[in-house]
Amino acid sequence: MTAQRHTEHPATAGPTERANRATADRVASLLTRAPVFDGHNDLAWALRRQVAYDLDRRDIARHQPTLHTDIARLRAGGVGAQFFSVYVPGTLTGGAAVTATLEQIDCVARIVARYPDTFVAARTADDVRRAIAAGRIAALLGAEGGHSIDCSLGVLRMLRRLGVAYMTLTHNQNVPWADSATDAPAVGGLTDFGRDVVREMNRIGMLVDLSHVAPTTMHAALDVSAAPVIFSHSSCRALVDHPRDVPDEVLARLAGNGGVQMVTFVPHFVSQACADHDAAEDARRHELGLDRVTVYTEHAGEHLDPQAVAELERWRAAHPAPVATLAQVADHVEHAREVAGPAHIGLGGDYDGVECLPAGLEDVAGYPALLAELADRGWSDADLAALTSGNILRALQVAQDVAEPGFGV
């Protein structure tokens, strides 16, 4: 993670070019000391859908044009630690969800074993620090959705023993004990069992992730949790009216909890124009019987009406999607800093979990460009280092300190 060398003599460059180079060199230097610790990457699910976990067919030691993630681009992006999501759709329930989650964990373990010079498995803050010091990328696990435990605290404990460092309480659908942001309210936040899940996560040193959950669930979890909570990949509701974004009244509680909002790059979470277009496409999908809950599952496209699919493509051609920008992502980062404070923000790109990304942040190599934008807006090195990894490392450490001995390490 070294700064790129410039072959031109500085005296021959104009003032804007010299300023850009100075910022790039500053960011590159910062990333050697405080590399990015990203909150959410769906590489494992992309590998499941694209190649049924055949790592030979998606050798990430080589450039992979169908993925946002490979080793060279992780290095170019200054990534020193990554929460790899072990996601399964909320439409999977019961034992099927548990099995699929275990297969996702196995995929990440196989990636780590296949590329030992690049990755090292990590579950604690000290593991992450050691990996960074050794020049390797710490690979941590995050389970995306409480359906992965099938209403069993025993399964929750076993996921922790397998190295899962956070669990998102819901995905797009409610679970029996917690309300999702994108489903009809059912339990008013958390049930008594849901509060028991949060307490047990505290006890075993697993971070409570509030991305995807309803505001009532966010508040209920904050009321219960003795350890910092996180939002592994969410942006700000004050800037974009999307249910997956975090309201200011919740952001304002993070300082008291010690939690971290990891701002995501998903276009319809960071751009109101993209959110409006996405809502219009969802309405057209519903008319055609192509709701996303049907389309974006493991066997997407296998049993869809071809005429409806063709009509959706015609609609898309007539209504091209707007493009989100890196500057809009920076706006969300700055808003989160203003409301929650500089000690309570991070980055959670959601790479390989979305179809497209903002201009300038198309893949995991894009983090330095975002940091350069923030540097040009006047951010100090200390605040940038807190954003890249300092804040989430602190939250992970505190979660371990709160945990019962034997689980937090």
Image: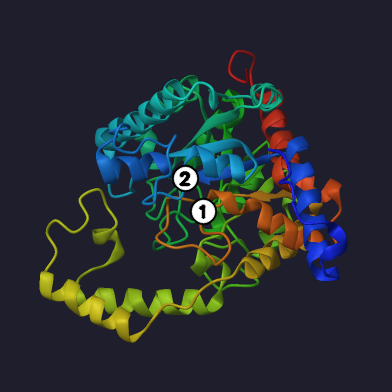
Q: Work out which quarter of the rendered image holds the C terminus and state it.
A: top right
Marks 2 and 1 in Cβ contact (< 8 Å)? yes
Callout 1 amino acid? Asp
Q: Within 10 Å of the Cα at label 2, are there few (<14), some (14-19), or many (20+) other Cα atoms?
A: many
Is 26 or 34 nearer to us in this picture?
Answer: 26
Is 302 or 12 nearer to us in this picture?
Answer: 12
In this rendering, is residue 136 above or below 330?
above
* Residue drawn at the location 40% of the way across and 29% of the way down: 105
Is 270 or 185 nearer to us in this picture?
Answer: 270
* Residue drawn at the location 74% of the way across and 35% of the way down: 394
* Residue drawn at the location 81% of the way across and 65% of the way down: 13
Query: x, y (%) of residue 48?
Result: 30, 40
Q: So how many labels did they put on this image?
A: 2
Q: Return the residue found at the far top.
A: 406
Q: Which residue is mark 2?
A: 69
- Left or right of 69? Residue 381 is right
Is residue 205 visible to us here?
Answer: yes
Kind of element beneath mark 2 = loop
Query: x, y (%) of residue 196?
Result: 52, 34
Q: Which mark is residue 363?
A: 1
Q: Within 10 Å of the Cα at label 1, are there few (<14), some (14-19), or many (20+) other Cα atoms?
A: many
